[in-house]
Image (cartoon, rainbow, N blue to C red):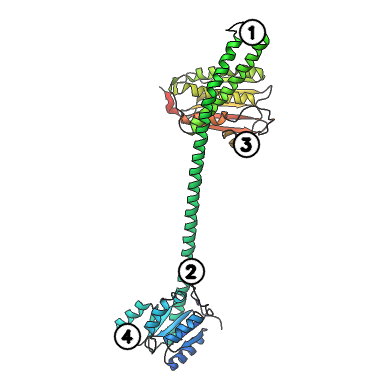
Amino acid sequence: MSPPDGVGVIEADGMSAPPMTMQTLLIVDDDPVVRSLMRDALEDEGFTIIEAEDGAEACAHCDQAVPALIVVDAVMPVMDGFELCRALRSRPHTAQIPILMATSLDDTGSIARAYEVGATDFIAKPLNWLMLSQRIRYMLRASRAFDELHKNQQRLIAAFDELRENQERLIAARDAAEAANKAKSEFLANMSHELRTPLNAIIGFASMMQQEIRGPLDPRYAADAKIIIDSGSHLLGIINDILDIAKAESNSLQLNEDTIDIDEIVQFCAELVAQMAEKGEVGCSMAVEKDLPKFFGDPKKLRQVVINLLSNAIKFTPTGGGVALTAGRDTGGGLTISITDTGIGMTTDQVPIAMAPFGQVDSRLARKYEGIGLGLPLTNKLVEMHGGTLEIESELGKGTTVTVRLPAERFRP
């Protein structure tokens, strides 16, 4: 005969006795005739029956193995049904077991007392066998549902605790990363500041030597002085970039804004990189929309943006290639500056590397192109400080287009 639907055993933490089989019921009644009739009726329904004649014997059975459900008479010698319920509820391994109290007591006080001591439900005597069977099935299904709900609750609590621990770890990791980043920025700013003072002195004295301010100098030493000036100026530019990126990351870099002419900014930058383009035999073209309104921004930092992008484009464009700059208003009224080259280009995966501070697409010590990887990150920071965005579209072996978009509200009527 197949087991009845919804039959199960109670599982409790700290349980000292193993559960009985899934369909085992414990019948507790001091009347052997009632127990016999109940056994016959319930075994016909597929249950396995264990009997006890009083509460004390029932407790002994439960210490050996926990049944799926207990049917207990209210009035018994030695230990009655009320005392049994209280005793079972006090033990961890039987605290959740379904208990059906069968009683001929029909006063409300006895019924209330049954629930107070821990009975799950009650049924009146004389017993209706069909109703008894259905009541047991219902209680077992409810017990199984409660157990599943309890397990799900425990799983949710465990998941929540794990989520909270993960969140705490992430917060701690974020705070540590922010502290490390702040310390790095402060170190770079301090180091850059300390290096600039003696470096300016080196460049200054080398310039005096080259200009022979303190008297004639052997031509060979004059050429050496120029090398010192050029190398020192290059190093000073790197140090200034490090200082700027450190200030930008610590939000201490400030804009000195004024009303400026975009055409003048572009022309100035084009003249500044013209020699570099000529030396590399790279063609350059500039096209600026006519009659652009005045623009409100930091002229020095906007020049730095355009110079960085132009010099990058020229540096990574081989001989015979070209660089084109266009500037004008977009459909939304904002300013768009676009620089396109026919250089070496990048893959999609390499673009984020190029945008990261000190990022090197070619990280080899013997790489062909000079630089420490601060040009694009610093340029991006300067654009963001103006409320704009910097976008890069690149294809390996074909070239790169960098587009700077600045908001329309920066134009002045």
The residue that label 4 is drawn on is: 106
Which residue is rendered at x = 32% and y = 83% of the image?
110
Q: Is residue 182 above or below residue 231?
A: below
**Tag 3: amino acid:** Gln
| Label 1 secondary element | loop
Which of marks 2 and 4 precedes in the sequence?
4
Rendered-image quadrant of the N terminus: bottom right
Q: Is residue 234 above or below residue 174?
A: above
* Residue to which mark 1 is pinned: 217
**Label 4 sits on what residue type?**
Asp
Question: Which residue in the structure is indicated by mark 3?
Answer: 350
Badge 3: how crowded within 10 Å, few (<14), some, or many (20+)? some
Q: Front-most of 114 and 133?
A: 114
Mark 1 residue type: Leu
Residue 325 can be seen, yes or no: no
Q: Image quadrant of residue 351?
A: top right
Q: What residue is disc 2 on?
A: 148
Q: Is residue 275 left or right of residue 152?
A: right
Residue 294, x across and y down, in percent = 44, 20
**Compared to 213, does 354 lie above or below?**
below
How far is the residue under mark 4 from the one under mark 2? 34 Å
Distance in Å between CA atoms under marks 3 and 2: 51 Å
| Nearest to viewer (mark 1 / mark 3) | 1
Which of marks 2 and 1 precedes in the sequence?
2
Between the C-alphas of marks 1 and 3, the distance is 49 Å
**Mark 2: which secondary structure?**
helix
Q: Amino acid at mark 2?
A: Glu
Residue density around tag 1, few if under 14, some if 14–19, many if 20 or more, within 10 Å? few
